[in-house]
């Protein structure tokens, strides 16, 4: 099963922590985080990005 990160746009405060941990997967656009490559979690730690998000805007779903 593939794990895919999802960012809740309404909850995100644009702190950029996820981008620092996982720049291959997350990017800031319009002062909010977006997922740019959901299949790249194997190149960085998406779960760490989820855990350090101060407003819990990131979830990891299994498909």
Image (cartoon, rainbow, N blue to C red):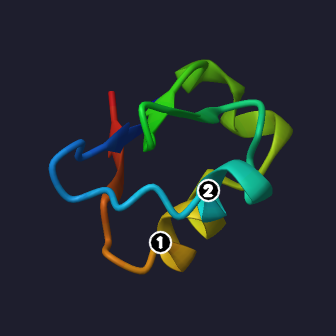
Give the answer, above or below, for where 48 lies relative to 28.
below
Pointer 1: what residue? 53
Position of residue 27 in the picture relative to residue 4 (left or right): right
Give the answer, above or below, for where 54 lies relative to 36.
below
What is the crowding at mark 2: few (fewer than 14 residues within 10 Å), some, or many (at least 20)? many
- Where residue 11 sits, quadrant-wise, is bottom left
* Discs 1, 2 touching: Cβ within 8 Å: yes
Determine the residue positioned at 70% across, 26% down: 40
Determine the residue positioned at 42% across, 80% down: 54
Determine the residue positioned at 24% across, 42% down: 9
Position of residue 14 in the picture relative to residue 40 (left or right): left
Pick the front one: 47 or 26:
26
Pick the front one: 38 or 33:
33
Give the answer, above or below, for where 22 lies relative to 42.
below
Position of residue 11 in the picture relative to residue 36 (left or right): left
Give the answer, above or below, for where 25 lies relative to 19.
above
Pointer 2: what residue? 18
Residue 62 picture location, percent across and down: 35, 38
State the residue lying farthest toward the left.
Answer: 10
Residue 36 picture location, percent across and down: 57, 20
Using the image, tell me which numbered label, if any, was put on residue 29: none
Determine the residue positioned at 61% across, 33% down: 27
- Where residue 14 sits, quadrant-wise, is bottom left
State the residue lying farthest toward the right.
Answer: 43
Residue 20 picture location, percent across and down: 77, 56
- Where residue 4 sits, quadrant-wise, is top left
Earlier-in-chain disc, 1 versus 2: 2
């Amino acid at each position: 099963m593939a794990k895919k990160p999802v960012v809740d746009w309404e909850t995100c405060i644009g702190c950029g922590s996820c981008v620092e941990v996982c720049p291959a997967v997350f990017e800031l656009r319009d002062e909010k985080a977006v997922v740019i490559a959901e299949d790249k979690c194997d190149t960085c730690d998406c779960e760490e990005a989820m855990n350090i998000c101060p407003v819990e805007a990131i979830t990891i779903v299994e498909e």
